[in-house]
């Protein structure tokens, strides 16, 4: 059983360190952590939280985040963004970055990798024969160690790749057995997965052209969200794009972003 004090202690810890607002999510917390507590021999949530708070780099913090984040994602999710990218954004990019051929994309909150690999396949297709002249490497980040391991390994159930065109499934995945497949080395090279907490200062030396930050800011409160959106704005090149989830919105009065179409913004 979790006491009110213990519940509040977890809520405060997760909110102040990771921005995730769990104030109204008591059932989610106990539903996801009760078994973990039992399996790992903790007699109370207080005992567990003392360990969490004592060592920010410890395995307890990692397990807390792995359990409390919601990592749902899938290939081609919100496919209208990929179409817009292919039809509008990439032709522009090709014209404007024709001399440097350095396209910098950040897939923030990448979860198990489906979104970043989808982007990589779009880029491969679009740049096609010129692909080896362009650097289109995608940086994909998340706060959960577990999902990043999964993403780096690039192993999926074959049925998870069904939303992808057959030609991509054949070209960029190798079947391991009747159920599973793995992303090809050629595609893996196009994505670098790294752990990064969106509450920390953005880790880029050069400004970005495209940011995908979809279906993560729903877990943050308005103040955290506005602050993050403004940091992303500062990190983009003029004319750079930000994509958020199609069911999400940002407070346009609180940012300098120009609205392009629902869930797409431009500096
Ligand atoms: C629902 S998934 C979204 C995946 C993908 N962007 C999509 O739209 O399909 C949300 C991800 O945000 C990550 N996340 C939550 N808080 C974070 C934070 N403070 N820093 C970085 N990632 C965070 C979670 O670990 C989770 O994998």
Image: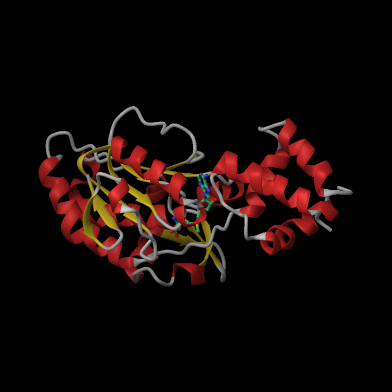
Tell me the quarter of the picture where residue 35 sits: bottom right
Total marks shown come to 0
At x 61% / y 49%, what residue is drawn?
146
Specify whether 193 is left or right of 53: left
**Would residue 48 be visible to someone looking at this image?**
yes
What percent of the width, then of the height, locates residue 203? 41, 31
Q: Is 224 situated above or below 25?
A: above
Which residue is at a point 43% across and 53% down the rendered structure image? Answer: 184
- Asked whether residue 190 appears in the rendered view, the answer is no
Q: How is the image coloured?
A: secondary structure
Looking at the picture, tell me which residue is in the foreground, 25 or 171.
25
- Comparing 6 with 103, the one in front is 6
Quadrant showing the N terminus: bottom right
Q: Position of residue 12 (x, y in %)?
A: 65, 44
Image quadrant where residue 52 sits: top right
Q: Indicate left or right for 168 with 12 as reference.
A: left
> Residue 20 in the image: x percent, y percent?
56, 49
> Where is the C terminus found, in terms of image quarters?
top left
What residue lies at 33% left-to-right and 67% top-to-bottom? 79
Residue sitting at 62 percent across and 55 percent down? 23
Indicate the position of residue 226 as horizontal and vertical percent values.
39, 46
Which residue is most to the left? 95
Q: Decide: is 222 above or below 83.
A: above
Horizontal arrangement in the rendering, residue 91 relative to residue 163 (left or right): left
């Amino acid at each position: 059983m979790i006491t009110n004090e213990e519940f509040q202690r977890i809520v405060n810890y997760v909110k102040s360190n990771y921005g995730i607002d769990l104030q109204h999510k008591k059932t989610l917390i106990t539903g996801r952590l009760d078994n973990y507590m039992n399996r790992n021999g903790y007699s109370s949530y207080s005992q567990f939280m003392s360990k969490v708070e004592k060592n920010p780099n410890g395995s307890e913090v990692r397990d807390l985040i792995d359990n409390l984040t919601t990592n749902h994602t899938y290939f081609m999710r919100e496919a209208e963004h990929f179409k817009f990218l292919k039809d509008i954004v990439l032709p522009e990019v090709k014209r404007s970055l024709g001399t440097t051929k350095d396209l910098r994309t950040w897939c923030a909150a990448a979860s198990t990798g489906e979104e970043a690999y989808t982007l990589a396949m779009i880029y491969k297709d679009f740049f096609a024969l010129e692909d080896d002249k362009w650097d289109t490497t995608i940086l994909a980040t998340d706060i959960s160690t577990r999902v990043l391991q999964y993403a780096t390994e690039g192993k999926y159930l074959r049925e998870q790749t069904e939303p992808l065109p057959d030609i991509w499934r054949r070209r960029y995945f190798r079947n391991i057995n009747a159920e599973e497949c793995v992303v090809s080395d050629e595609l893996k090279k196009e994505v670098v997965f790294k752990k990064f907490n969106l509450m920390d200062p953005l880790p880029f030396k050069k400004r970005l052209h495209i940011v995908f930050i979809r279906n993560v800011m729903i877990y943050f409160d308005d103040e955290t969200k506005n602050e993050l959106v403004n940091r992303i704005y500062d990190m983009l090149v003029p004319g750079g794009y930000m994509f958020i989830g199609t069911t999400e919105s940002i407070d346009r009065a609180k940012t300098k972003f120009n609205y392009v179409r629902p869930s797409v913004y431009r500096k």
